[in-house]
């Protein structure tokens, strides 16, 4: 597995992690700030993931 | 004059090492990539074993003996974000090399190294030292009723929660001959300076005096039933605990409890891996013959070395993605 593929797997796990952390923060009421921060991070990383897939097709050989 | 080391160590020779750039016909990969995946497989077994041990120790812990909410979650969250960012920058550094943009490679690699250094600095200069000045006293079960105002077990039983056997905070006075006498003296001076109170030291020689954490100062407060994201400041309330009622007492070091033993073992081992990654990245960033200077003679070889180091770094970050929730959140 190349770094490109492993990075993709890593980012997907991070997206799941952020989604889980947002869920945990809202469910336990630990911190709304953390919940929203995690939810936004989840969204940002999803966008980054898609951009990475598109860009790495043409740039990284 | 030839290098005398070449007689003994083939590593130092100028001999051509095969398949550093081109793929081996039998594996379809360059040799270092096969090597790093074999190494990462062994790492999976190492950390897998430790995580399994953690799970079984936690599941087998007696009710009330597995603490929660003792770690600084915002700091842990910040460190998690730093590691995720460093994983992105190491890929950008590799991509820059692939596109033969050396200055961008240097910049992204520098950011990666700085992220690793920040992670380690926060861990070693803030998180761990804070633990070594936090004290916990486990009360004997038969004596727990005497300390009900600090343990709140009636409230916990009424709300269907596990009992609490530990009183935590800053140690202000320790029994005579205790290892922690010096630390207690220092904390007592600080407490007197901050609050103007000089009642932290008792006349009795076998008492612990603890400046209480919020959870023990108001144990029946429902706010303390759930985990807090932001650390709650220590109160000015004091608890005087007789040594004969104490099952065990120590700072939050590995000897304190199974929880802290596993915490320090796993985060310490992870920290060593981060340190190893930083050293390799520094080698690839500085103008060593096999580091950044390799770009002049064989840029693809340098790109492959960065890819290998990047794979290791991703693994280390992935371990942290599992370490963070199990220790800090759950």
Image (spheres, coloured by chain):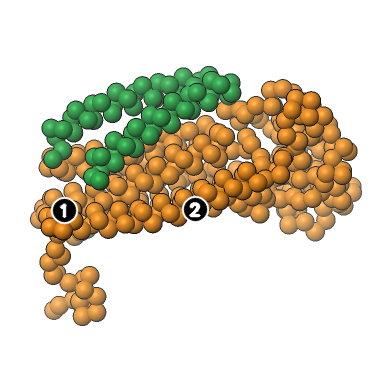
Q: Position of residue B244 (x, y in %)?
A: 87, 51
**Which residue corresponds to mark 1?**
B28
Q: Quadrant of residue B198?
A: top right
For label 2, the SS is helix
Residue B130: percent from left, percent from top: 60, 43
Pointer 2: what residue? B49
Please tell me the colour of chain A: green
Q: Residue at x 41, y 30 (%)?
A: A16
Q: Of label 1 and label 2, which has the lower sequence position? A: 1
Q: Where is residue A51, by image quadrant?
A: top left
* Quarter of the C terminus of chain B within the rendering: top right
Tell me the chain of label 2. Answer: B
- Residue B82, horizontal then vertical, whole percent: 40, 36
Query: Which mark, residue B76?
Result: none
Above or below: residue B291 compared with residue B199: below
Say whether residue B10 is left or right of residue B44: left
For chain B, give the colour. orange
Front residue of B234 and A50:
A50
Mark count: 2
- Say which chain tag 1 marks: B
Is residue B139 in view?
A: yes
């Amino acid at each position: 597995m190349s770094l490109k593929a492993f990075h993709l797997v890593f980012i997907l796990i991070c997206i799941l992690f952020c989604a889980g952390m947002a869920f945990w923060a809202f469910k336990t009421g630990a911190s709304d700030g953390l919940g929203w921060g995690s939810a936004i991070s989840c969204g940002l990383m999803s966008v980054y993931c898609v951009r990475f897939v598109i860009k790495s097709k043409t740039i990284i050989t | 004059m030839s290098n005398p080391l070449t007689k003994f160590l083939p590593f130092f020779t100028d001999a051509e090492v095969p398949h550093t750039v081109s793929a081996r016909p039998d594996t379809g990969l360059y040799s270092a990539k096969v090597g790093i995946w074999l190494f990462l497989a062994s790492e999976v077994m190492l950390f897998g074993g430790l995580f399994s041990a953690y799970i079984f120790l936690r599941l087998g812990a007696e009710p009330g003996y597995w603490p929660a909410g003792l770690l600084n979650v915002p700091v842990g969250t910040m460190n998690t974000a730093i590691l995720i960012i460093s994983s992105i920058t190491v890929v950008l550094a590799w991509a820059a090399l692939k596109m033969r943009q050396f200055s961008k490679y240097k910049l992204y690699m520098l950011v990666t190294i700085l992220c690793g250094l920040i992670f380690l600095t926060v861990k070693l200069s803030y998180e761990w030292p804070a633990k070594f000045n936090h004290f916990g006293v486990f009360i004997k079960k038969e004596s727990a009723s005497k300390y009900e105002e600090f343990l709140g077990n009636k409230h916990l039983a009424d709300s269907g929660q596990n009992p609490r056997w530990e009183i935590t905070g800053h140690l202000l006075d320790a029994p005579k001959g205790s290892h922690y006498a010096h630390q207690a003296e220092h904390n007592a001076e600080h407490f007197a300076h901050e609050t103007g109170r000089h009642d932290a030291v008792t006349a009795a020689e076998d008492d612990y005096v603890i400046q209480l954490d919020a959870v023990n100062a108001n144990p029946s407060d429902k706010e303390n039933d759930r985990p807090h994201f932001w650390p709650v400041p220590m109160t000015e309330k004091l608890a005087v605990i007789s040594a004969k009622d104490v099952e065990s007492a120590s700072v939050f070091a590995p000897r304190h409890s199974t929880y802290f033993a596993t915490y320090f073992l796993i985060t310490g081992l992870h920290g060593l891996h981060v340190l190893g990654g930083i050293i390799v990245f520094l080698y690839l960033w500085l103008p060593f013959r096999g580091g950044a200077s390799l770009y002049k003679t064989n840029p693809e070889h340098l790109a492959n070395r960065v890819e290998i180091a990047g794979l290791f770094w991703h693994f280390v970050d992935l371990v942290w993605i599992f370490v963070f929730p199990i220790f800090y959140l759950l």
